[in-house]
Image: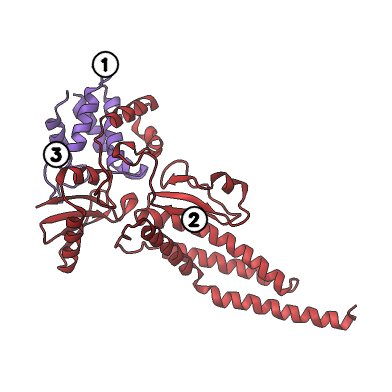
Amino acid sequence: MVDVKSINALLCERDIEGLIELGAPLDEYESEAKIIAEAVSDLTVEQRTEENILAIVTVVWAKYFELSPNELELRLPNLKDLAAQIAR
Amino acid sequence: MRSGISIELQFKAEQHSAEQVWQERFRQRSGLAHEVVQRRIDEIRQAYEYSGREFPDIDAPDTTDLEAEFQQTYRDMLQSYRQQMDTLSAEQLSNRLDGAQDFLSSRFRQQLDRILQPHYGINHFIWSGGGADPCGNCSAHQGQIGMWGASPAPPGCDFCRCYAAPYLGPIAGDIYADAIEPVYPEAIIPALRIGLRAWVFARAIVNQNSPKIPIVGKPNNLTKHGEVRWAERNITQREVQEAMKTAKESSNITSKIGKYGTLQHRYHGKNGVTVIVETEGRNAGKIVTYWRN
């Protein structure tokens, strides 16, 4: 399984929603980290492409932060970088 | 049978009366735009009351430009009918003005609903109304629930009185957090440069791995992220309300422009709970997260 802690660390570092900056605890994105980690773990090695991982992190973000397409688009650069980091 | 003279007199009386109708409309309807805005907000308030939820304590969005545009269009419409006063009876003029007013109000109302409902945290609408004789388009969509910002958009209607009523009722599959099924992310696939297959695959795989969120005791007006935080942080609705109340009383609310240009309020409750509320966009009025200090 992909490591939840390292994905959580990446999410805290990126702080896509700016909640850590507002003072939220470091487990703020932990549930999203867990879902991403579990979903990525369900992929076969061949399926762990940047494209599939980007789809996963975007679905998680759209779903949990209930974003409109415009709002999601503003976060895309961060989500793309995140997907690239996880894929490495 | 009326004589030629009496017909002429009657016609003049009607002309006078038509002018009176026109003048009256012109005078009375100067505040129509504002009236429509207030009615739309009242309807949202009623939807909250009906669902047992609290109407979000946020300022109304700025609709000044839209109101001015509507008012100008309304005045132009009245001016265009002024030229017809010579040929129309008071009743005819009154009927035509009613029709034109309905048409303009309906379009204005649709524009307002798109702004006001998401602003006050209403994510879904239910296609409603239409009176006794809805048009075919509206009949086909009656009772359908849609999501603001999603595809397909509200049907839209210029011909009858159907409209997107605010909807805060249960959504199929909304009992657990894993079932939210907005169609809208498809709209962003081109920007993502990922294939539809990858998207559908990801959605299925994420839904499989999403935690179940119980509905019992869940505070109102949370984002899904907030719901998960609620389930994991054991902070009750009463504590959240207390935090927001005491923060307001002690003016301990800080406002900050978030990373994407939206204003967020941070309530520092005296009970040691901090609550973050989004004020703009799809999540306007919703609690994004909270924590114990």
Instruction: Say what secondary structure mark 2 lies in.
Output: helix
User: Mark on residue A61?
Assistant: none
Mark 3 lies on residue: A13
Mark 2–mark 3 Cα distance, whole angstroms, equals 41 Å
Q: Amino acid at mark 2?
A: Gln
Residue B199: image quadrant is top left
The color chain B is rendered in: red
Q: Is residue B8 above or below residue A49?
A: below
Q: Colour of chain A?
A: purple
The label on residue A46 is 1
Left or right, B284 with reference to B271:
right
Q: Secondary structure at mark 3?
A: helix
Circles 1 and 3 on the same chain: yes
Q: Are marks 1 and 3 in contact (CB under 8 Å)?
A: no
- Residue at x 85% of width, y 83% of height: B6
Report the amino acid beneath label 3: Glu
Q: Which residue is mark 2?
A: B110
Q: Are marks 2 and 1 on the same chain?
A: no
Q: Nearer the viewer, mark 1 or mark 3?
A: 1
**CA–CA distance in space, label 1 to label 3:** 28 Å
